[in-house]
Image: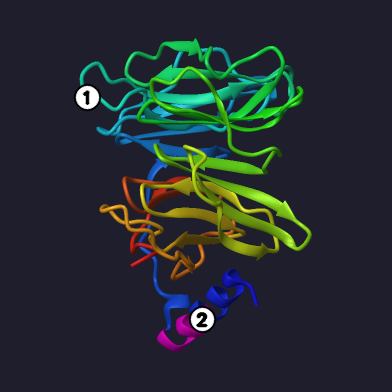
Amino acid sequence: MSNLRRALTFTLTAAMSLGLASAASADSLVQSAPGARNLAAGGGYLVWAAPAEAGRWKLVVRAPDGKVTTPAIPTFGALPDPAVGSDRGAIAARRLLTVYSRCAGTSAVSGCDVFALNVLTGREERVTRLSTRAYSETNPQIALGALTAVRRGGPRPGVYSFGSGVRAARRLTRFVPAEIAASASRVVTAERTANGYQIVLRQRSGDGTPRVLASDVPARPRSLTITRYRAGWLAGAQAFQTTRFAGSSGVVFNPAPQQGNRELPASVDSIANNSSIVNWYLDGEGVKLLDPRLFG
């Protein structure tokens, strides 16, 4: 039995015995956003993609004070998948950016380059370190100046990482995963296998052996998240988060997937973290704040 199936069996049994599966939810709607997709969070900001005219998409930004804006940038033919993070580790002159791909036409995988939006100024620029003519770059991530993206096509596709202040790209995989999420030090990927999918954790440096966090996941995991110590994802209307895979002193643990204490609404599209836990989700109504938390 896979570690994910063990976790599912254990948590479902515990939920039935404790009545958690039917626990009342007081989740609050913090922003109405019908039809929105791909929620991301960082630095107190929330970003998502919303339907625009003629079947296109636009980015929407919600500031920590609750102010919602639509940046004055071109709309998207393909659904964007934003990620939020800072462009450097040092506090001085640090910028909070949302990174995403702009693709040719309505394709989400072909002719894509990486762009960044400064959430404070609303200014957009092409991320030249990640964007190339030889590849199509998708699923970009940014954390404390470290950049990660999936490169498709070209002679050497895979997951590429740029450390903060490092010019040369490091290829972490030789294949194209279904999805990635990245912190300043680690990258988590959803990878197709003969038995479904697996969630794999790698050091951004390329050191060490990749660690399988969950295996034999029957359906494609989506909305991958990562914090300094944990990874999470959605499977249907159920959220999962791992136990800690490392400690502040550098001690490495043996992480296991944990199932949230209740299912989210059937229309759930994505989840997002604050600094350490899954705190928000996006469903057919809009952005919601979790209450109670999904994980202890």
Q: Is residue 69 left or right of residue 91?
A: right
Residue 275 seen: yes
Residues in magenta? 12-18
The image quarter in which residue 171 lies: top right
Question: Mark 1 or 2, which is nearer the eye?
Answer: 1
- Disc 2: CA contacts within 10 A as few (<14), some (14-19) or many (>=20): few
Q: How many marks?
A: 2
Q: Residue at x 53, y 74 (%)?
A: 7
Residue 33 shows in this picture? no
Quarter in which the N terminus is drawn:
bottom right
Q: Among all residues in the image, which is located at the extreme left?
A: 92
Point 47% across, 69% down: residue? 262
Give the side of residue 161 with respect to residue 144, left or right: right
Work out whether residue 251 or residue 91 is closer to the camera in this orientation and state it.
251
Q: Closer to the N terminus: mark 1 or mark 2? A: 2
Q: Secondary structure at mark 1?
A: loop
Q: Residue 35's x, y, as percent?
A: 58, 39
Return the residue found at the far bottom: 17
Q: Report helix, strand or loop for mark 2.
A: helix
- Residue appearing at x 53%, y 54% in the figure: 233
Q: Mark 2 is on which residue type? A: Phe
Residue 212 vs residue 5, the one in the foreground: 212
Mark linked to residue 27 = none
The residue that mark 1 highlights is 91
Is 15 included in the stretch rendered in magenta?
yes
The quadrant in which the C terminus is found is bottom left
Instruction: Check if residue 71 falls in the magenta segment.
Output: no
Q: Which residue is mark 2?
A: 10
